[in-house]
């Protein structure tokens, strides 16, 4: 997956002030066309937005007479009718103005660069102009790298997530303006992460995502980390690593309190750490899952204080045998749906395979209802196959030291004893298998009552 197209042109660029993001001119392009065939289809509208000094400074757009019929679906999609273009200019009449507006040194930006730029270059070739062989940035790919679990990266939806108004989707200038505003948000994010040069976006020293921030010892101190945490309102996992990437601490925090901050501060000040990562998450259950996955990689000498912190902070319960049996049954046969970090997204976990395989599905409802039901159906079959029509008991391995924490959490889910369980939806394989229609009604009721109004990624670390 590439942010850049033709990025090889950048590999040899010098580390001069002209490489600074704040000094580079960008030109955002969006095309509306009669179709995707470079050899046959034509442009019907082009929108361009110029960015200089990290500000939008100019825009240009043209309706273009394609001189061929516009397919009905394109007319419906764009609201551009054939009759609207009868008196419009032809592309050869404005191509030089377009080339001049873009400029010789601008970096091209598009939300689907793999389509827009090659299509425009095919027009230049046909009209016997030189192609634009320069670095181009794709904000669609950039979105998927910065928000890897997003289920939909189309421009209208991403613009909505970031609060960017989009009055007329699939109109070239409006799409170019939204893309430009989105790109400026991304540039602001990179600058906040001390990425100042264009090459460093494509060749970063470490991965950058909106849901996490990394601190290196040579660049940061404890106060920087505490300051970042003070701005956070989401559950998170803090991972502290020492030399050679050894995990020294891994703390899952549901909702930070002054006591949590003091615990973290003490852990950092008493540790010779190299890097610290804060990763925000949508629901505390995912933090527990991450801790379980990495627990054996955490330095053993920090296990006792970690377990002590978890027990004190989250109040492990001593469950009666009947309650333990109830939780054990839930793990073998249960499913759990929780809000995801991304607005309007959810995660479903098949608990029987929670620590291996594809046990999680991220989805939006009702858009991905079919995918959700297919996921449930597949895992219900596995439950049936794995326990002989639910009479046998397949074992689910949980790290022994973390078993009390998981059992306490899941018992609270089943009995709804804690506030962090109020936004969960749990059910058994048999609920879906025996009464699918009733189950679907219950599912719809849950989503209606529990909308995921997260402000991420608009609000992030």
Image (cartoon, rainbow, N blue to C red):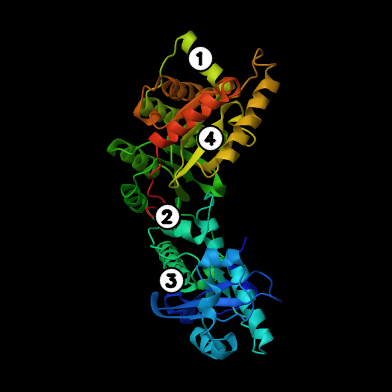
Label number found at residue 51: none
Label number found at residue 177: 3
Helix, strand or loop for disc 2: helix
Residue 143 position in % (x across, y down): 51, 59
Q: Which residue is mark 2?
A: 161
Q: Sequence order check: which comes first, mark 1 or mark 2? A: 2
Res 193 quadrant in image: bottom left
Question: How far apart are the two marked residues, 4 and 3, measured between alpha carbons?
Answer: 36 Å
In percent of the image, x 48 and y 31: which residue is there? Answer: 443
Q: Sequence order check: which comes first, mark 4 or mark 1? A: 1
Q: Which residue is mark 4?
A: 348
* Residue closer to the observer: 356 or 257: 356
Q: Which residue is mark 1?
A: 326
Res 252 quadrant in image: top left
| Image mark count | 4
In percent of the image, x 57 and y 86: which residue is there? Answer: 90
Question: How far apart are the two marked residues, 3 and 2, measured between alpha carbons?
Answer: 16 Å
Q: Sequence order check: which comes first, mark 3 or mark 2? A: 2
């Amino acid at each position: 997956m590439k942010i850049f197209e033709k990025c090889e042109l950048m590999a040899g660029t010098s580390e001069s002030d002209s490489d600074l993001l704040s000094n580079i001119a960008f030109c955002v392009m969006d095309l509306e066309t009669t179709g995707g065939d470079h050899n046959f289809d034509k442009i019907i509208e082009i929108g361009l937005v110029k960015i200089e000094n990290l500000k939008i400074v100019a825009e240009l757009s043209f309706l273009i007479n394609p001189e061929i019929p516009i397919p009905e679906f394109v007319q419906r999609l764009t609201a551009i009718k054939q009759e609207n273009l009868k008196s419009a200019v032809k592309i050869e009449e404005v191509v030089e103005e377009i080339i001049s507006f873009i400029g010789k040194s601008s970096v091209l930006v598009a939300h689907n660069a793999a389509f827009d730029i090659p299509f425009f270059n095919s027009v230049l070739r046909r009209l016997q102009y030189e192609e634009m062989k320069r670095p181009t940035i794709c904000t669609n790919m950039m979105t998927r790298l910065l928000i890897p679990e997003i289920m939909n990266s189309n421009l209208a939806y991403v613009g909505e997530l970031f609060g960017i108004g989009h009055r007329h989707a699939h109109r070239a200038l409006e799409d170019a303006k939204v893309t430009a505003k989105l790109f400026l948000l991304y540039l602001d994010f990179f600058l906040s992460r001390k990425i100042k040069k264009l090459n460093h976006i494509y060749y970063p020293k470490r991965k950058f995502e909106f849901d996490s921030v990394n601190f290196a010892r040579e660049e940061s101190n404890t106060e920087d980390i505490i300051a970042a945490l003070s701005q956070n309102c989401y559950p998170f996992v803090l991972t502290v690593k020492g030399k050679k990437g050894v995990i020294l601490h891994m703390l899952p925090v549901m909702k930070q309190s002054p006591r949590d901050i003091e615990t973290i501060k003490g852990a950092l000040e008493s540790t010779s750490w190299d890097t610290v990562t804060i990763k925000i998450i949508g629901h505390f259950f995912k933090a527990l899952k991450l801790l379980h996955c990495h627990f054996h990689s955490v330095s053993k000498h920090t296990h006792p204080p970690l377990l002590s912190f978890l027990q004190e902070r989250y109040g492990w319960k001593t469950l009666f045998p009947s309650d333990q049996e109830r939780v054990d049954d839930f793990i073998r046969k249960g499913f759990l749906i929780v809000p995801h970090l991304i607005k309007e997204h959810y995660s479903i976990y098949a608990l029987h395979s929670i620590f291996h395989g594809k046990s999680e599905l991220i989805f939006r409802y009702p858009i991905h209802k079919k995918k959700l039901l297919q996921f449930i159906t597949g895992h219900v079959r596995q439950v049936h196959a794995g326990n002989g029509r639910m009479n046998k008991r397949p074992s689910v391995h949980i790290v022994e030291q973390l078993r009390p924490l998981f059992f306490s959490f899941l018992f609270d889910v089943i009995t709804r004893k804690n506030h962090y369980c109020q936004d969960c939806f749990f059910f058994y394989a048999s609920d879906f298998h025996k009464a699918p229609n009733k189950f679907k009604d219950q599912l719809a009721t849950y989503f209606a009552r529990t909308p995921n109004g997260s402000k991420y990624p608009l609000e992030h670390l």
